[in-house]
Amino acid sequence: MNKQEEEGAAAAAAEEEEEEVEPVSPTGQYFNSSALSIAVLGVLESQVPIDDSQTMALLKDLFLPINPRFSSIMVRGKNGEKQWKRVEVNLRDHIKVPTFPPGMSSGFYDDHFSDYMTKIAMEQLPQSRPLWEIHIIKYPTSTAAGQVIFKLHHAMGDGFSMMGALLSCLQRADDPSLPLTFPALKMGLDSDGGAAGMFRRVPRVLSGLLNTVFDFGWSLLKSSYVDDDRTPIRSSADGVEFRPIRISTVTFSLDQIKQIKSNLKVTVNDVIAGIIFLATRLYMQEAGPEFSKANSTALVLLNTRNIAGYKSLAEMISPNHDTKWGNQFGFLHVAVPELTKSESSDPISFVSRAQKIIRRKRDSGAVFLTGKLLDTLRRYMGPEAVAQHIHNTLKNSSMTISNMIGPVEQLALSNHPCAGIYFMVVGVPQSLTITMVSYMGNLRVAVGTEKGYVDSQKFQSSIQKAFEMMFKAAVKSANP
């Protein structure tokens, strides 16, 4: 090979290497830093015993092609910036199939499954290989004949991206040739028109500006200086993200939630928020009446994409800003309403208060300004400083709430019908995390609690009690 050919080969190799490296998004850097390492556990409950003979083929043919992130590791470039570098994936390193004692009862396997979830929630994903794992549980619990757990690092994408990725591996159980459908999303639009409508909107614009200033200032204080009270749902301990957590779930009928919504003339999200906030206060009140008015804040996560529903993989990896893969979300600081004696017997008023608080927060531009603040901090102080800011934001609040919309039809993974799905965010410096996902006409609420501090069974019972109180009150209000 002459000198010219050598130079050409070197240039081609350099070009190929450059193509195999992509910059890590700012949020991806924040979530995989010295201050934060956050992952998502997605659980698919199989209706039939699991046959894992096709696992390798499915991962190779369906999962890995979804996005280059699943075949990449995070490395530092020459200037210290973080990059995604494509690597060869040894699938056997990513597949975990635990062994439990055989021939035991479903209750026995419930406990073993719970302990296993605690174990993998605490473990860090190795940085030397792509940041995901698949755990296959072949033992029958009280809710499923087996489970498949996807553990995905949050640096690769948010819940919208992860759900889109998982759905691309699944099919409709009744007819794989038909597309999945999702509950309709109703966008709240202002119907006022003309000059009269414009003048009626002026007070809302002015109040929105005032709310933006107040909410942004309050968010900044909560992230930097002001933390919530220590309560039965917040231990306020340093390093709480490294402590064991317990994950439990409770399921509600979406039809009943919609009935509450219709009777109270609010939105589904208002009903869900009211139930979660009421349940939280009921749990705290049981520990002591003084906690009914304790300073407690929830971080409510919002998808900031200007779209309704999931997009195809081709759309998600396109350059279009509104649909692209990644982490595109913001959060609202929402004070958990205090629980008065009257609201203990009249939960409808509690929903109304929750609705007013969230609506006012949504009308402000605090989420946008917070995003600009993080971008400014990154430019002048670096991603590690922003990661620490986000860590403080989480640690100073009491809980995080996030929700996803799942399909109406039953899903199937390689001819394994899914009895249920849910997810949990782990590695968060909080004692309480609540996630929700709709599926087949139900709403599955997952609760992640600091083990040994928050009683998961009691909190789960509080959620059930809050729902029953709300439903009973809503039916009574419609039939006085």
Image (cartoon, rainbow, N blue to C red):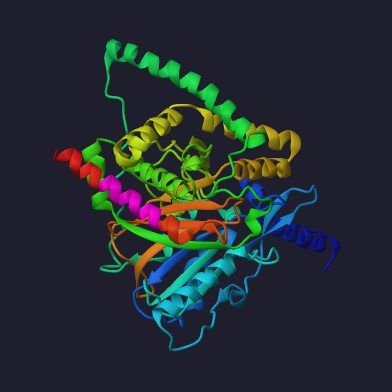
- Left or right of 73? Residue 476 is left
Q: Quadrant of residue 356?
A: top left
- Left or right of 163? Residue 119 is right
Instruction: Depth check: give the residue in front, 289 or 5.
Output: 289
Tally of numbered tags? 0
x and y, in percent, of residue 144 in the image = 37, 73
Q: Which residue occupies the extreme front position in the image?
A: 289
Q: Which image quarter is the C terminus in?
A: top left
Q: Which residue is found at the position 57% from the left and 54% from the top? A: 154
Q: Which residue occupies the extreme bottom position in the image?
A: 103
Q: Which residue is found at the position 74% from the left and 61% from the top? A: 13
Query: Is residue 363 one of those drawn in magenta?
Result: no
Can residue 245 be seen here?
Answer: yes
x and y, in percent, of residue 342 in the image = 33, 35
Instruction: Depth check: give the residue in front, 128 or 467.
Output: 467
Q: Quadrant of residue 14?
A: bottom right
Q: Which image quarter is the N terminus in?
A: bottom right
Instruction: Depth check: give the residue in front, 9 or 281.
Output: 281
Instruction: Depth check: give the residue in front, 469 or 422.
Output: 469
Q: Which range of residues does the magenta coloring cover?
A: 461-471
Q: Which residue is found at the position 36% from the left and 46% from the top? A: 275
Q: Quadrant of residue 361?
A: top left
Is 319 drawn above or below residue 208 in the view shown?
below
x and y, in percent, of residue 276 in the image = 40, 47
- Left or right of 249? Residue 68 is right
x and y, in percent, of residue 318 in the image = 50, 48
Q: Main secondary structure of the magenta part?
A: helix
Can residue 37 be seen here?
Answer: no
Q: Which residue occupies the extreme right position in the image?
A: 3
Is 10 drawn above or below residue 259 in the view shown?
below
